[in-house]
Each structure stands twice: as structure tokens, then as C-alpha cells.
Image (spheres, rainbow, N blue to C red):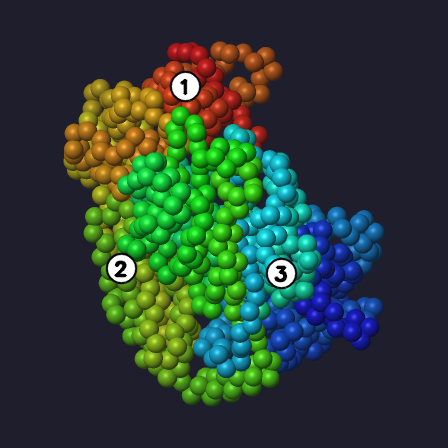
Amino acid sequence: VQCLVLVDNVIESRLLGLVERTKEHALFVFTHRRMAITGEDVTLYDIFPISNDFAVVEVFKCLSRDISIGADTRVRLNFQDGDLEVRLPFGSHSRLFLSEVNKAWSGKTCQGKVKREGWNELKREGRHDLVRQSSHTASNKATMLAMPQFGLRDNLIRCELLKNEDIYTYLENFSFFIGTYNVNGQTPKESLRPWLGSTSTPPDMYCVGFQELDLSKEAFFFNDTPKETEWMKAVSEGLHPDAKYDLVKLVRLVGIMLLFYVRNEHAKHISEMEAETVGTGIMGRMGNKGAVAIRFRFHNSDICVVNSHLAAHIEEYERRNQDYKDICSRLLFRQHDPALVPLTIMKHNVVLWLGDLNYRLSDLDVDDVKDLIAKKDFETLHSYDQLKRQIDEKAVFVGFVEGEIGFLPTYKYDTGSDQWDTSEKCRVPAWCDRILWRGKNVRQLHYQSHMDLKTSDHKPVSSLLEMGIKLVNEESYKNTFEEIVRSLDKMENECIPSVTLSRREFHFIDVKFMQHQAETLTLHNDGQVPCQFEFIQKLDEPTYCKPWLTANPAKGFIAQGGNVDIDLEVFVNRSTATELNAGRQQIEDILVLHLDRGKDYFLSVLGNYLPSCFGSSIQTLCQLRDPIQEMPLETIRELVMNTIQTRPLIIDKPLDIPKEIWQMVDHLYRNAPKQGELFQQPGLRSEFVEIRDCLDTGMPDSLPGSNHSVAEALLIFLDALPEPVVPFSLYQQCLECCSNTSHDVFLHPQVVSLLPQCHKNVFNYIAAFLRELLKHSTHNSLDVNILATIFAALLLRSPTKQDLAEKRKTQEFFQHFLVQDLS
């Protein structure tokens, strides 16, 4: 936790850490730079063992805003060699830290004297190494929540401070330089100063995003690239020369990278920094497409910056829309207080969104586009822009603003020139690279491309934004805080919380695999005091609900007379489908809604699940000649039990392979042997739903959807198998084949021969299909490495967490079946 420490009668900022070593504890005090980002930024200053001589002798509140909003906690700690006065910032994070210190202290008083010499030896071992090797561990949240003085009061104070923010804050303008550049896998060949240093005065902050940083297979599959350092160095050297900047954060997902720099004098006002990534590639995981993002608080304003690379190709605007929605729903930032729900992108005062959004120009051929460009008729050209049309239809970026475009399309150029694409494909020029924002008090000063840079087939784009940031008036803040505390004291003494529920029973009809359903519960605070609610776990259950159910939000608080909508969401995925298919679980649960200092309410959740081939075992499906939803539920359950208990089969002759696998592979074999980016480009969510229903019901006779959607459905099917094609029991033998120093080529098929017959049939069938695809590699651009990487992760799943060495061995094992026919 960051704190203020009294050192030689001077208050200085320090980092305070509680460290455990062989059941002994000590407080580590670190000095740090303005912004402690990595271990290189902090230095171990001193170590204070928690021994019998240790005591917390004084705790009281102060109304200070040295660190963050709220009442700071001042603590004087006694040690054998003296005392230490620290001031911890307001909030549950600080109190949780103190509760952990108290636990360590109370435990030590029962254990006897601590050996101080061991801690002194740690000092001598090397303080920098201790910092770099340390890791963050989750705190004991249950301890904090059990303490009655924690939780509700803080949240109420935060809420009231937020409601009255206009009273104690004022706006001051700061400049943000936003830049985006798709570098097409190139290394830096020229100075970035014409782009990053193009403003007349130095910006206060830089948010610089790259896409396609590295196009190599190593970067794609292992998220490792030397180009990260090369481009970071180029950016640092290209920043405005008239100011000094600190690199606050770097976050990267494969080729998508975001760098955040601030002027030195502003770094101390940055807090609550978090970074997250989301892949939207095949199966929603691969990081060749997706987003990286940061969020932070600057003074009193919360800001989120997103750098995204959306789906390519002119006709794929619906997939770009889907990528955008996936990023918005899946990208969540954890809060420093673990009791608080994660923050979504839109839960910020300002959102800055940049990147290669890949929206193209529709309904114009290349000559018409170039003619309008020659006339500099950008207004007419912009009317054909897919992003503009999708925003106008409110399909994406609702509430976002983009400045007027007065520059040439930024894609596609011949590398090293300003010449439009002269390749055989002759791409239509487009504004792929964009910058948008969402929020109040933002004014754009410029929006332009930078034609001087010729490294890539894209041109970089920049936007200079003037942003009104909320600063705090200390005196007004103090008066507001004191008034809120007095008001809360009075309410807490007089009132008990109460809410009215809009309903208590929820029915989910015909729930399907990977198809979201939601019902809304509205809570109305009809009491005389703000209240805090939380769904709590029932006796002997690990969580508050079944794994297929979530409540969003699961906790929160409601102002007096206010309402909160809670979405009860049902979503069955690979981890829950198997139990529901087998009938061992039902769509049935009871939720307990608890009011802090109030009573509990009970909610009933009921529904029915439609069995699916997704999440069913290979052996069960081989016994089903009809679609699974045409079979009586009792028959399916009996088949599952027979598989588990290895009873005799119900039918005389089972299918060689599940008909569902045959349908998908046969469809791809006939329609997609030359399809580019097969198994690398995601399909459409709506088409997956149609494919799933076709496989589960037998209607229609042939599979719907694009080749990419069918290919992704096959991968999802394999991923959802409760027992992978290579059973868990044989996983280790597969790895040992690759560890064999003799490299005996016949060891691999010997292991496959041990598979259960239906599993062996599926393994050989898929391998044979993939070898057929490789015969068309000149058209589909597939190679052995790509296919081995994708399919090994599905066919040879580890029963435990898989490390990188195991991952490479599984790929090596499966490659043997792609390079030659060993059947």
C-alpha cells in the first residue's frame, strides 16, 4: 500500500509491504519514484520485524487529501528500535492491509520471540533483488468483510462524495496526444518525431497504439517478440523534445501494443493504474485481433484508453461490430478494493478509443474512390464509410465522437512510398485507422494523418485532445466530507435498511449451449437510509450461485429512494454443459440477497436446458444415430451413465465417429479446402447459433453459415468435449514420445493405437482432413505449424495447467501426423 511516512520530521511517500517468510512477518518499507511501475522503480529502505516488541499504539482519522479522496488513517507502530508513523489512504484497501498486519501481530504474540537476525540477513542479500522477485498475493477479503465497521460506510461516503463532486472540484485543461499506427510487422526505419512531435507545444500525455507489431508465428502463438523493445525505443526518442516524459505503462497482446507516457510533473497525480487485454480471434481467444486497454485516475477524473485491431476484409463489417461488442463486454478492470465489482470500459469519465478499426469504404470501386480523393471531396467519400454508417445506425460506438476527417485515407499504400496499393489485389483506399472519444469536456485540436512516415502500408494518425480534468478544492472537499459524515451518523442511529423486489421467481425457458439469456430484477430502496446489498453463498456452497448463473452486479448499494437493476444471466459453456447434458445438473438455484444491517431475501431460479452435442462425450455421441434433441432425456442420461460405468452399449453397432464431427469436417472438405485464413479467422456468432441448432436438431439438412463459422464451430466442439480426443490418461505418454532421445517415429502411432476405438477414429479422421488441407497450402496459406498449434491444444488437453514446454511437446507430437501418413 502507498503511504506517507514521517522521516526525520519530514513527511515522505513510501510503499509499505507486509512480507511473510517461514511463518514470520515483517513490514518492508520502500522508497520509490514518482510512479512505481516495476521493480526497477523501488528501493528497499528498511525492514521492521513484527515481534513481541511490535504494537499498534495509536489509530485515528485525519481529513487530508495527500493521497486520495476520503479520511486517511494515521497509525503509529512501535518496534524494538523505535516507532514509525504512517498515514494510509482512505478506503478498504488500507483497512484490509491493517487487518492483515493485526493478524500477523496477534499470531506472533502467541508464538514467542522472533529472530531479528534473519530479517537483517535479508537486507544484506540485496534489496533490489527482493523487490524484483516479490509477487502480489490476494488479501484475505473475508476478514475485512467480517468487520462491521468496514464496507457500507465507505461506500456510502464514496457515493455521497461522487454525488456532490461539483461542489469541491473544478476543471483544468490538459492536452492528450493520441496516436495509432499499423506497422505491418516492420521494424522502425525512420524517426517518429514527424508524428509524435508534430504539436507546437509539448502535450501533457501520450497514448500511442500500434497494431501488427509482429506478424511472425512466434508472436502469434507465444506472444513473444523483440519488436516491442524496438518500437518502444523509437517512441521514446520521437516524443516532443521540449518536455521530459515518464513511461507509465506498456501493455501488449501479440501485435497490439499501447504505450502511455506522462510529463514528469504529472506522474504523481496518476493513480489506480490497471491494464487488460482481450483476444477476439478464433474461438474468442487468439490475440491476432482484439484489444489492449489501460485505465487510470488523473487527479479526480477516471480515464480509459483502448487500442483495438478489429476483423479485416471489406465485407466483414458485421464481424468488426461483433469484435467491438466483445471487447466492451469482456474487457474488465479489477479495482484496488477486491470487494468492488470490476469496471467496464464505459464506467469512466472519458474513454479514448484508437486503433486499426478496419472499417472500409463500401459501394464504390477503386477508381471512384481515387477520383474523390483527387478532388479532396472527403465529405462525399466519408458518406460511404462503413464506420460512419454503423455509428449512424447505432450498431457500434454509441455515444462516441469522431472529429471531422480532412486527411487522405490511411490504407493501403505500397510500403516505402505514398503510392496507393499497386499489388494484384489493388486494395480500395480506406480510413482504417481511427480515433474516437466518449465523455464530457473534451475538445479536439487536431485530427490528421502523417504522410511523411513510409515504413508501413498504413499511415499513422494522431489526434490532439484538450480535456477538462477534475481537480479538488481542498477546503470545499473538507467541508463536504464533514457534512456527509455528520449526516450518515444521524441516519445510522435512526434507520434500518429496507428494499422492495420487483419479483422473486425467474424462469429461463429452453436454455441452449453458449446462448445468453437474462432476466432483470429491480431493487427499490423504500427505507429511510442508503443500503448495501450482496448475494451471499448458502451453507456448504463455495459461491453464491451455480456456475451457469451470474448476477450483475452481485453487490452494490442503493441511495435512499433509488433503484438498481440486477441482470440475472444464464450462460452454459464448456465447463457446465456436460453436467446439464447428462441430467446431473438442472437449471435450478436459490439465491440469497442480503442487506447489510437488514434482512435476507430468497430468489428462485428455474428453467430447462436443451441437450446439445456440444459438451457431450465422443462415446455418447457415437451411440446416437438421431440428433440429440430428438432423443428422450432418459435415453441420453442412460447412455451417459453407461459410458461412465463402462456398461454394454445400448445399440449393437455404434457410429465410427460422431455424426456431428463428420458433418462439419465433410462440409469444410467439400467447400473450404482453398479458403484463406481457415481456422484463424473467427466466424459470426449468429451463424454459430444456426450451426449448433442444425447439429442438435437435424434441421436443416445441410450446415448453414460461412466456412469460417463452420471451422470455428468444429474447434468449439473439440474444446467442449469432457474427455479430449486423446484421453487425459494418455496425455503423459504423448509427452514422453517427444522426450524420447531416439526420436522413434513409430512411438507416436503406438500411443494413438491405445486410444478407445471411437477416440482413435476421430483422431485419425481429423488428421487425415488436415493433411488434405495442407495439399492446398498455396491457396489457404496453412502450414504444419499453424495447424499443429491450433489442434494440439484441443486434441491433447492437459489434465492440469499446461506450461510452455508441454505446449510445445503436444504440438510436436501432433505434427508427426500431419507431415506423413502413419495410419
Taking the spot 74% from the left edge, 69% from the top edge, the residue there is: 12
> Marks 1 and 2, how far apart in space?
50 Å
Q: Which residue is mark 1?
A: 778
- Find numbered disc 2 in the image and state the secondary structure of the residue it sits on: strand
**Count of number-bearing discs:** 3
Residue 737: give x, y in percent of width and height: 53, 19
Residue 329 percent location from the top left of the image: 39, 53
Residue at 55% x, 56% y is 177
Q: Is residue 458 above or below residue 474?
A: above
Image depth: mark 3 or mark 2 in front: 3
Q: Is residue 93 left or right of residue 565?
A: right
Q: Earlier in the sequence, mark 3 or mark 2?
A: 3
Q: Amino acid at mark 3?
A: Thr
Give left or right: position of 188 versus 345: right
What residue sits right under mark 2 in the picture?
519
Marking on residue 272? none
Q: Tell me the kind of residue under disc 1.
A: Thr
Are discs 1 and 2 less than 8 Å apart at CB?
Answer: no
Seen from the viewer's position, the closer of residues 820 and 544 is: 820
Identified at 71% across, 59% down, the residue is 33
